[in-house]
Amino acid sequence: MRKSEILDYNTVYKRRIAKNEELRKIKGYDFLNYQTDLIIKYSASIGNGFSIETKEEPLA
């Protein structure tokens, strides 16, 4: 018979849980994906909302 291994749960969870630096990267990627999805979704109306009209002033 084979003995069952004793699991060290601290090492198991340290491997599974993301560290702070990794969390920042994950959140950054999620934000960029969400932002690009919104840009693609509303790309037709984005250009209409930001029209800039310039007035030419006569030179003195």
Image (cartoon, grey):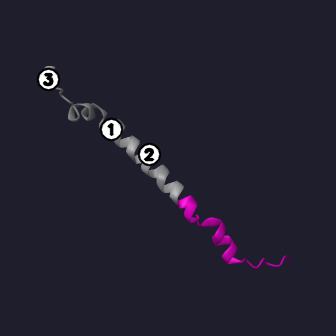
Name the spot of residue 41 as percent of width and height, x first.
32, 38
User: Which residue type does callout 2 highlight?
Assistant: Asn
Query: Along the polypeptide, which appears first: circle 1 or circle 2?
Result: 2
Residue in view at x 13 percent, y 20 percent: 58
Query: Along the polypeptide, which appears first: circle 2 or circle 3?
Result: 2
Decide if residue 4 is on the left or right side of residue 22. right
Q: Which residues are magenta?
A: 1-23
The dot on residue 50 is none
Q: Estimate the spatial distance between the alpha carbons at disc 1 and disc 2, rounded to whole Å.
A: 12 Å
User: Of helix, strand and loop, which one carries label 1?
Assistant: helix
User: Which residue type does callout 1 highlight?
Assistant: Lys
Q: Estimate the spatial distance between the alpha carbons at disc 3 and disc 1, rounded to whole Å.
A: 38 Å
Q: Estimate the spatial distance between the alpha carbons at disc 2 and disc 3, rounded to whole Å.
A: 43 Å
Q: Are marks 2 and 3 in contact (CB under 8 Å)?
A: no
Q: Image quadrant for the N terminus? A: bottom right
Return the residue at label 3. 57
Q: What crowding class fits label 3: few (fewer than 14 Cα within 10 Å), some (14-19), or many (20 or more)?
A: few
Q: Nearer the viewer, residue 31 or 3?
A: 31
Return the residue at label 1. 41
Seen in the picture, residue 2 relative to 39 is either above or below; the reply is: below
Seen in the picture, residue 34 relative to 21 is either above or below; the reply is: above
Q: Are marks 1 and 2 in contact (CB under 8 Å)?
A: no
User: Which residue type does callout 3 highlight?
Assistant: Glu
In the orientation shown, which residue stands out farthest toward the right?
A: 1
Q: Nearer the viewer, residue 11 or 32?
A: 32
- Reply yes or no: does residue 9 show up in magenta: yes
Return the residue at label 2. 33
Picture quadrant of residue 17:
bottom right
Decide if residue 46 is on the left or right side of residue 10. left
Decide if residue 32 is on the left or right side of residue 56. right
